[in-house]
Image (tube, rainbow, N blue to C red):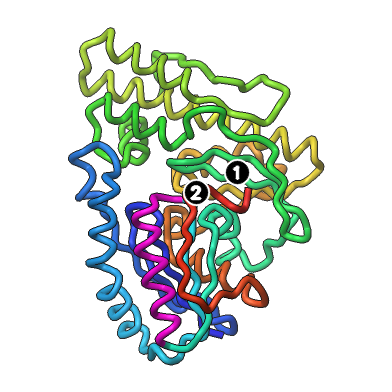
């Protein structure tokens, strides 16, 4: 079975083709970062317009590059939420109309669920159960993925997500969007910070997170000093470590208390190099899995792959479009 995956939930237009016998045949991503960077965040209307412009050319180039005929596709999987409603509508309309024209079925995919299972694209031996940390610009969720692939949420952020705080602090530091990679670049410039920011809820007995207090503390510090190249690196270093400290502590705690040694970290923030290195070093008694860097941020490969996992059910062949701004998985 050959599956076309389409992802358009936010500011990446992404497509991929997955062959159930061979594996991932190819994928392509168009990022809108240059469009939105001047505004310091995503502008939904601009995102929608760019998806409209890019979907057909990207599909054409993907098919041509990998010598695949459109009629060879057996199933179309597409993101139905959560995300921005405009971009979701564009992707869903494109996917369903294409499936209808080819007389094949389509399947709706939950964006967050696709992230959780994205590590399995390259980690062939990875199977549930595992503890999942999904950490991105919109979500920070700790859950247990059970042997039957069901999800049991253990905890989540009570306010801002980790990725959101990275972006907001980066903006106050005068760094470009997206903020996470820029803060990491600054943090790498020094070995030790003179600041010690809060590690919110790191000692709480539950699995929840809270990052708004950390954000406030860092912004207050920024407001009380004159920023320089040195101070930006100094602040970035401990700010990044404070988030990573909390993420590792909570995740390992869940793994220990549940007796599940497999830990899977996914979502855009999972591309953070220091997060990856510290998880591997500080949780070395566990089995740590990350998706490939290319599959950490939004991508069509995870949509196509989950479409294959779900290919025995959940089909739709009507033209009704009903995207959801919230997750149906959690």
Disc 1/disc 2 C-alpha distance (Å):
8 Å
Counting from the top left corner in percent of width and height, residue 12 is at 34, 57
The one of 263 and 268 positioned closer to us in this rendering: 268
Q: Give me the residue at 34% from left, 27% from top.
A: 169
Relative to residue 99, is residue 180 depicted above or below? Answer: above
Q: Main secondary structure of the magenta part?
A: helix
Q: Which residue is disc 2 drawn over? A: 267
Query: On residue 133, which mark appears?
Result: 1
Counting from the top left corner in percent of width and height, residue 258 is at 80, 40
Q: Are the residues at dot 1 and dot 2 in contact (C-beta closer than 8 Å)?
A: yes
Q: Which residues are magenta?
A: 83-101
Q: Give me the residue at 59% from left, 40% from top.
A: 141
Q: Is residue 18 visible?
A: no
Q: Quadrant of residue 286?
A: top right
Relative to residue 157, is residue 105 depicted above or below? Answer: below
Relative to residue 13, is residue 243 depicted above or below? Answer: above
Counting from the top left corner in percent of width and height, residue 256 is at 77, 37
How many numbered marks are there? 2
Assess disc 1: are there few (<14), some (14-19) or many (≥20) residues with their C-alpha within 10 Å of its C-alpha: many
Query: On residue 141, which mark appears?
Result: none
Assess disc 2: are there few (<14), some (14-19) or many (≥20) residues with their C-alpha within 10 Å of its C-alpha: many
Q: Give me the residue at 49% from left, 46% from top.
A: 270
Q: Is residue 135 visible?
A: yes
Q: Secondary structure at mark 2?
A: loop
Counting from the top left corner in percent of width and height, residue 211 is at 49, 25
Q: Earlier in the sequence, mark 1 or mark 2?
A: 1
Q: Is residue 99 magenta?
A: yes
Q: Give me the residue at 40% from left, 17% from top.
A: 216
């Amino acid at each position: 079975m050959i599956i076309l995956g389409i992802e358009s939930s936010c500011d990446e237009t992404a497509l991929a083709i997955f062959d159930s016998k061979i594996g991932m045949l190819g994928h392509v991503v168009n990022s809108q970062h240059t469009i939105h960077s001047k505004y310091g965040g995503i502008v939904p209307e601009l995102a929608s317009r760019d998806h409209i412009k890019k979907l057909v050319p990207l599909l054409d180039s993907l098919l041509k590059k990998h010598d695949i005929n459109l009629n060879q596709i057996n199933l179309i999987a597409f993101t139905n939420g959560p995300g921005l409603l405009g971009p979701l509508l564009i992707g869903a309309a494109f996917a369903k109309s294409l499936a209808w024209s080819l007389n094949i079925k389509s399947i709706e995919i939950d964006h967050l669920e696709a992230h959780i299972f994205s590590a399995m694209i390259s980690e062939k031996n990875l199977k549930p159960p595992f503890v999942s940390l999904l950490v991105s610009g919109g979500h920070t969720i700790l859950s247990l993925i059970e042997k039957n692939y069901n999800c049991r949420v253990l905890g989540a952020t009570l306010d801002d997500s980790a990725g959101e705080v990275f972006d907001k602090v980066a903006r106050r530091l005068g760094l470009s969007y997206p903020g996470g990679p820029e803060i990491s670049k600054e943090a790498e410039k020094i070995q030790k910070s003179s600041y010690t920011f809060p590690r919110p809820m790191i000692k709480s007995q539950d699995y929840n997170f809270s990052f708004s207090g950390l954000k406030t503390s860092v912004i207050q510090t920024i407001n009380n000093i004159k920023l320089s190249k040195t101070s930006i690196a100094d602040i970035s270093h401990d700010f990044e470590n404070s988030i990573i400290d909390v993420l590792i502590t909570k995740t390992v705690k869940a793994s220990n208390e549940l007796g599940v040694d497999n830990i899977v970290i996914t979502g855009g923030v999972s591309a953070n190099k220091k997060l990856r290195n510290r998880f591997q070093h500080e949780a070395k008694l566990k089995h740590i899995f990350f998706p490939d860097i290319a599959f950490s941020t939004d991508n069509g490969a995870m949509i196509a792959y989950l479409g294959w996992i779900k290919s025995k059910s959940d089909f739709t062949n009507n033209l009704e479009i009903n995207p959801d701004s919230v997750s149906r998985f959690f």
